[in-house]
Structures are given as C-alpha cells and as structure tokens.
Image (cartoon, rainbow, N blue to C red):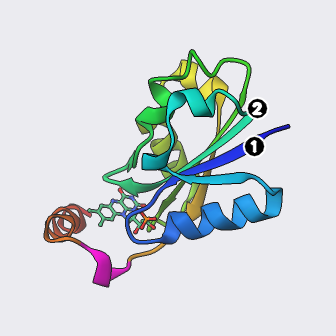
C-alpha cells in the first residue's frame, strides 16, 4: 500500500497535522504546489489536508476535479479550522465542500487548528473580521 499525504497550509496548522500523519504512516509528504495528478495516481491511499477558509477547504479542487480519475483509491480528506468542531459544524463543512456523490468516495475528518495572527495577510484580516461580525 503506497500512501501519500498532500497538504495546503497558510499558517502551519495543517502542515503540522500532515507531518504527524505522514510520520505515523511512513507515507510520502508533499506540499500542494509540488504534486500533480499524474504523480497522485501512483498511490493507493491519498490523504489530503487543507485549512478552512470561509467554510471552504483550501485546495480541495485537486481532489474534487480529479475524483473520477482517483476511482478505486482510498481517499481521505482532513480540514483544519478554528471552529471547535461540533457535529453540526462538521456536517456543514462536509456538505459545503462535497456533493452527496463525492461524500461516498471521500472519508472526511475535521482536526481542530487555531489562529496564528502573525501570519494573517491584510486580506485574511478583512475576511476574518467580516465573518466574525456575522457570528
Ligand atoms: C480569512 C479566514 C477565514 C477563516 N474561515 C474559517 C472557517 O470558515 N471555519 C473555521 O473553522 N476556521 C476558519 N478560519 C481559521 C483557519 O481555518 C484556521 O486558522 C486553520 O487552522 C488554518 O490552517 P492553516 O494555517 O494550516 O491553513 C479562517 C481563517 C481566516 C484567516
């Protein structure tokens, strides 16, 4: 079984989880921009991790747009966000990112991250302030 962990991380939370998972499984570890679909196809198990930004999983299109080509492989996705991760929140993340059909093919997990205010860009700060105002 060949396993790969691919991650896209802005401030490091997802990278840390991805590193732990890859170490534990002795899997290959790649940053999102360093991998393409043809390389992914050589693995049996694909684990993808991305941060949550406005309920969207950062970089998840890599999996979604290639889901048919990944048929027959084990696909695991984890998202890391600041939300505590109640069941209803996890359902919302799942439904917001995957169609019902895609949910049958993807095993989804939520792993809690946090905020690293030192690494926010000015745009991140604006979006974050806007979403906090809506709470
Ligand atoms: C602009 C912005 C939007 C965010 N939106 C969400 C969100 O919708 N849900 C959530 O749980 N966390 C949200 N977060 C928090 C991030 O998902 C959290 O910091 C995550 O751990 C980041 O992981 P990364 O640094 O590895 O990308 C947001 C953060 C920022 C800066």
Judged from this view, the residue extending furthest toward the bottom is 118
Of all residues, the one furthest to the right in this rendering is 1
Q: Are marks 2 and 1 in contact (CB under 8 Å)?
A: yes
* Residue ID for mark 2: 44
Tell me the CA gap for discs 2 and 1: 6 Å
Residue 115, compared with residue 74, is above or below; it is below
Quick one: quadrant of the C terminus? Answer: bottom left
Upstream in the sequence, badge 2 or badge 1?
A: 1
Report the quarter where the N terminus lies. top right
Magenta stretch, residue numbers: 116-120
The percent coordinates of residue 55 (x first, y second) are 37, 49
Vertical comparison of 127 with 119: above or below: above
Residue 18 image-quadrant placement: bottom right
Callout 1: SS: strand
Q: Quadrant of ligand 1?
A: bottom left
Q: Which residue is mark 1?
A: 3
In this rendering, the answer to whether 92 lies above or below 53 is above
Instruction: Examine the structure image and report whether residue 47 is included in the region drawn in magenta.
Output: no
Q: Is residue 85 left or right of residue 96?
A: right
């Amino acid at each position: 079984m060949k396993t790969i962990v691919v991650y896209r991380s802005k401030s490091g939370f997802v990278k840390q989880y991805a590193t732990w998972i890859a170490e534990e499984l002795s899997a290959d570890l790649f940053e999102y921009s360093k991998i393409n679909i043809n390389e992914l196809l050589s693995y049996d198990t694909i684990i993808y991790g991305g941060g949550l930004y406005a309920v969207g999983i950062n970089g998840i299109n890599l999996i979604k747009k290639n889901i048919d080509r990944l048929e027959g492989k084990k696909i695991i996705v984890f998202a890391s966000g600041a939300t505590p991760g109640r069941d209803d929140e996890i359902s919302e993340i799942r439904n917001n990112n995957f169609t019902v059909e895609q949910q049958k093919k993807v095993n989804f997990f939520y792993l809690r991250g946090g905020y690293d205010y030192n690494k926010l860009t000015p745009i991140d700060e604006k979006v974050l302030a806007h979403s906090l105002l809506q709470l």
